[in-house]
């Protein structure tokens, strides 16, 4: 029998214990939430996903074999934590897999994650499975068949992170401008003091005065973020998110003040698996390029994804001989330099001060932050650093690094996108992921297939940002009509996701 772990200070008669003991006994109908997820592994990623799912009012069960970690997580999260081995069929059964919707395997071992998913697939008919897998060998099989070894979805952290890095590069490394390509619109952040019309003006007055072709979906104030209503009055120090077609935003507020980045020289610190995946995402040619004629080489480069960045010269720097050799072999066009990152002459000797972009992709997040700061202070135009948890994300915006990519948050976001209903798709996260812009599709399951925005009855703090009707994007007002088949962009705090899903039928 599994021993559930309870928070400190909650006795046998407490609310927690009564509920958790019933769940462990198999009475899984105690929870009233409409989705149940079992997570194996209470590392930082597992805890982040569990925290977000609990905030969305999901029924969450965590399986963790380490007693100290189990106790700490049980004290932190309002969910069941079972101190057991996820490869034990009895443990899986007692955790409630028989009526779970999802099983997410996040242990530190690829093999353990795959075996656990296989046990779940073999023993329980209902749950779909997700496994975090770092090995390129296992990841390469993803999609080969519908359910490989019992795994419905394989998530590779390096793959997800490399896609995130590539997206940032292709959008121009501008931290204040995001293209919402799905709707043909742009999300742009300015400070209210940049436009004399904004401070002291309510949003209702602003749209009435200068037009309806834009909206303000979010405002940054005093370190927090607000989803504003029409009577919200802007302050001079507010960070204001503007949403609309680029041409309308340019006409109403002027063009963005950041310069268009033409990349001629790109430097990457680190020659690891993440670097290799980033190079592939950017369209850097592999060894097959060596067999092509010079004309065919030029033609291929001209039509590659890398050409969108200007086909820059790429240099990778790492002191590890074996890793450097792998990069040289897999990407012949990339210059590889073996050097210690702490070498004081490195910046000048390798021309890092003249680089258009520096990507810090080493396995050390502290090195990535420091290297990016040093490069930026030396003259590098744009810098990006990859970190592995939330610690350094608190510095974003307060230090001179253009973009920080949190690998844990990227992977967590990918898993949450899978777990959430298919008709709800995350487009962009605000304010360290606390707020989201999502796109929903009006289907037959939607409770109100026709009517106006007001008819939706959305709670305060959830804002409809755009409507796509018959291929045309509309910046809506409360009287804008919606119809079956429309796509709607919504800005909301992530803990309100369950309220959004309640608009759909069971």
Image (cartoon, rainbow, N blue to C red):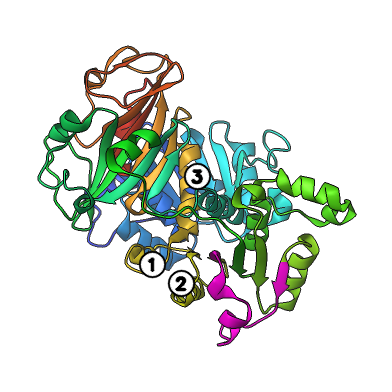
SS at badge 3: helix
Query: Could you say which quadrant of the image residue 213 lies in?
Result: top left
Observer-nearest residue: 502 or 455?
A: 455
**Residue 236 rendering spot, x and y as whole percentages:** 15, 53
| Few, some or many residues within 10 Å of mark 3 (<14, 14–19, 20+) | some
| Few, some or many residues within 10 Å of mark 1 (<14, 14–19, 20+) | few
Q: Is residue 146 above or below residue 6?
A: above
Q: CA distance from mark 2 to mark 3?
A: 33 Å
Q: Point out the tag, 3 or 1, that comes first from the N-terminus.
A: 1
The magenta stretch is 335-358
Observer-nearest residue: 403 or 200?
A: 200
Q: Is residue 310 above or below residue 247?
A: below
User: Which residue does the image show at 58% across and 54% down from the upper left?
Assistant: 162
Q: Which residue is mark 2?
A: 376
User: Which residue does the image show at 28% across and 37% down from the upper left?
Assistant: 252
Name the side, left or right, on which 276 lies relative to 101: right
**Residue 428 rendering spot, x and y as whole percentages:** 41, 43
Residue 361 lies in the magenta stretch? no
Of all residues, the one furthest to the top in this rendering is 450
Q: Which residue is mark 1?
A: 391
Q: Which mark is residue 304?
A: none
**Residue 133 rendering spot, x and y as whole percentages:** 62, 53
Q: Is residue 200 above or below residue 98?
A: below
Of all residues, the one furthest to the bottom in this rendering is 344
Observer-nearest residue: 147 or 298?
A: 298
Residue depth check, mark 2 versus mark 3: number of the one nearer the observer: 2
Q: CA distance from mark 3 to mark 1?
A: 21 Å
| Few, some or many residues within 10 Å of mark 2 (<14, 14–19, 20+) | many
Q: CA distance from mark 2 to mark 1?
A: 21 Å
Q: Point out the tag, 2 or 3, that comes first from the N-terminus.
A: 2
């Amino acid at each position: 029998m599994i021993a559930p772990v309870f928070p400190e200070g909650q006795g046998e008669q407490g609310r927690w214990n009564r509920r958790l003991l019933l769940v462990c006994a198999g009475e899984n109908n105690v929870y009233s939430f409409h989705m149940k997820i079992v997570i194996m592994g209470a590392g930082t990623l597992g805890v982040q996903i569990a925290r977000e799912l609990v905030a969305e009012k999901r029924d969450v069960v965590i399986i963790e074999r380490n007693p100290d970690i189990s106790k700490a997580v049980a004290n932190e999260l309002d969910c069941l934590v079972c101190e057991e081995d996820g490869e034990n069929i009895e443990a899986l059964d007692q955790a409630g897999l028989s009526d779970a919707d999802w099983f997410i395997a996040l242990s530190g071992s690829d093999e353990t994650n795959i075996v656990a998913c296989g046990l779940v697939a073999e023993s329980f008919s209902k749950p779909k499975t997700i496994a975090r897998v770092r090995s390129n060998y296992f990841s390469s099989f993803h999609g080969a068949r519908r359910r490989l070894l019992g795994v419905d979805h394989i998530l590779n952290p390096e793959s997800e992170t490399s896609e995130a890095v590539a997206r940032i590069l292709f959008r121009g490394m501008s931290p204040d401008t995001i293209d919402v390509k799905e709707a043909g619109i742009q999300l742009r952040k300015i400070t209210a003091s940049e436009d004399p019309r904004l401070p002291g003006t309510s949003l209702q007055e602003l749209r009435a005065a200068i037009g309806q072709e834009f909206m303000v979906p979010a405002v940054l104030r005093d370190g927090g973020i607000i989803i504003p209503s029409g009577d919200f009055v802007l302050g001079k120090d507010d960070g204001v998110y503007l949403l609309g077609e680029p041409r309308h935003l340019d006409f109403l507020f002027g063009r963005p003040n950041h310069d268009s980045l033409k990349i001629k020289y790109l430097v990457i610190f680190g020659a690891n698996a993440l670097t290799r995946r980033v190079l592939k995402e950017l369209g850097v040619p592999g060894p097959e390029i060596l067999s092509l004629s010079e004309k065919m080489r030029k033609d291929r480069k001209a039509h590659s994804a890398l050409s969108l960045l200007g086909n820059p010269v790429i240099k990778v720097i790492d002191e590890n001989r074996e890793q450097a050799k792998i990069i040289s072999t897999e990407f012949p066009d990339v210059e590889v330099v073996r050097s210690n990152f702490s070498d004081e002459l490195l910046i000048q000797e390798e021309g890092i001060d003249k680089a258009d972009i520096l990507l810090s992709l080493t396995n050390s997040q502290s090195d990535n932050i420091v290297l990016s700061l040093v490069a930026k202070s030396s003259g590098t135009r744009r810098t990006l650093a990859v970190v592995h948890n939330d610690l350094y994300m608190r510095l974003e915006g307060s230090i001179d690094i253009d973009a920080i990519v949190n690998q844990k948050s990227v992977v967590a976001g990918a898993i949450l996108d899978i777990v959430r209903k298919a008709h709800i798709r995350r487009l962009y996260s605000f304010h360290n992921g606390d707020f989201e812009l999502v796109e929903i599709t009006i289907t037959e399951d939607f409770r109100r297939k026709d009517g106006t925005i007001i008819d939706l009855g959305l709670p305060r703090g959830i804002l409809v940002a755009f409507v796509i009707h018959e291929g045309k994007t509309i910046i809506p007002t409360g009287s804008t009509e919606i119809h079956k088949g429309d796509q709607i962009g919504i800005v909301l705090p992530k803990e309100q996701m369950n309220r959004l899903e309640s608009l759909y039928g069971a």
